[in-house]
Amino acid sequence: MAKLAVPLLIFFFLLSCIPSQAAPPLQTPLQTPIQKDHSTSQYIITAYLKTPLMPTKLLLDLGATYSWVNCDDYISSTYQHVPCNSSIANSLGSYGCVDICDGPPGPNCANNSFLFLPDNPIKPVDYKKVNGLNDALVDYLALLNTLGSLSSIDNFIFSCARTGFLKGLAKGVTGLASLGNSNLSIPVQINKAFSSSPNCFAMCLSGSISQPGVALFGSKGPYNFLHGIDLSKSLLYTPLIFNPLGRDAVPNTHTLSPEYYVGLTAIKVNGKMVTFNKTLLAIDAQSGSGGTRISTVVPYTKLQSSIYKAFTLAFLREAASSAFNLTTTKPVKPFSVCYPASAVKTTQMGPAVPIIELVLDRQDVVWKMFGSNSMMRVTKKSVDLWCLGVVDGGAIDGPSIMIGGLQLEDNLLQFDLQSKKLGFSSSILSKGTNCADYKFPTRKV
């Protein structure tokens, strides 16, 4: 029988009762490749879980509270369940605690076990067909360090999930990696395990078919890419904003959403201001809607309908000007603005189209998006197009603007969770490098 459980904060007290082995010194940054699955436009990291350590592919989610893994075939000699004492779990919402499990003992079933309610951000889980409440586990998680060996956390907390949670995820993916602003996310748990390292992580998404980008944990730099380029020196900074009414937030408990928002104040196309209702750029204090969020599970930036209309009109006008002389052609879904590829010139920064500028907390803090981040190549049958990689997000039901994966590729983003600020580079193509050029250490067996 399940009943409501203790707050998640009690986990860290309970962990003191769970035996662990001493972790090796941290050689920062810990790192993992990020591979784009082009059939789904999902970004996948590889972490090492279990004993013995096994490579595990996980969907990267910047907005998740905790990670989860399919436990239907989970085999490890070191996993442990998280015991709980009946109380209310309000820190991140109310979950459950099972007193007596009526199934065979295993990762998915134990007496006196705390339960999570994981979700799939790609395809909503049908809880009528799949058991939503799943056991919390503690086990080893390891990532590559700067010496080429693995550094491990021996008390990594995550949720089990059933096979039904994997629907819609890329082939070979068996769970989700949380990089959100939460006590249970991977970067924060790394910081707790290696407290001498900064509470900070960076990521650089690659759009390459074959070469991965990188996620870096526990370091503010240097971030060394090929050709001797340290991208930590190329960052501008803006405050991170956290939604008190967003995903997994608990009002009146100071538990904010783990999702990352930024304070966008204006949009420019080709240097000209786009006119729209600027109140949409603020998070509504009553509903939590509005604002600008960064997402790795949305392939293209989504704009609230009125912003989208104003933005696309501005882009069409500038693209048709004498500087570009572009004429639209029949679009291909999900896009509404497309140009024949033969008519678009190619530059170091991608297709030659109007530059998009996201003006943040100050007029001189501007995230620039060139053609490589604003345009999507569509080639199929007799069609060869460059399409504006921004889509209509409909009416307000969440963020007014959601910056998606295409717009993040070949940009270095640094999430400083201690100082609550975002460092961003804009396109690193301008530096003569890209996210696939990160210098991974040689793996030591």
Image: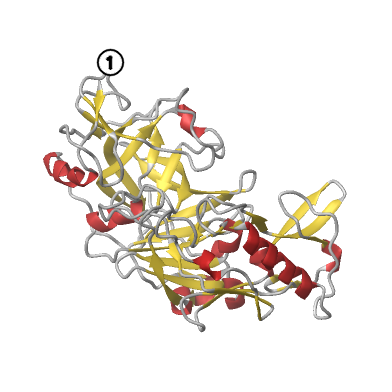
| Relative height, residue 125 to residue 329 (above, below) | above
- Residue in view at x 40 percent, y 60 percent: 285
Image coords of residue 106 (percent x, y): 29, 23
| Residue at the outermost front position | 286
| Relative height, residue 65 to residue 82 (above, below) | below
Image coords of residue 333 (percent x, y): 74, 49
- Residue in view at x 51 percent, y 36 percent: 124
Image coords of residue 406 (percent x, y): 61, 59
| Relative height, residue 1 to residue 346 (above, below) | above
* Foreground of the two, 84 or 16: 84
Which secondary structure lies at badge 1? Answer: loop
Horizontal placement of 245 versus 316: left or right?
Answer: left
Asked whether residue 163 is in view, the answer is yes
Quarter holding residue 416? bottom left
- Residue in view at x 56 percent, y 40 percent: 170
| Relative height, residue 153 to residue 431 (above, below) | above
Q: Which residue is mark 1?
A: 102
The quarter of the picture where the N terminus appears is top left
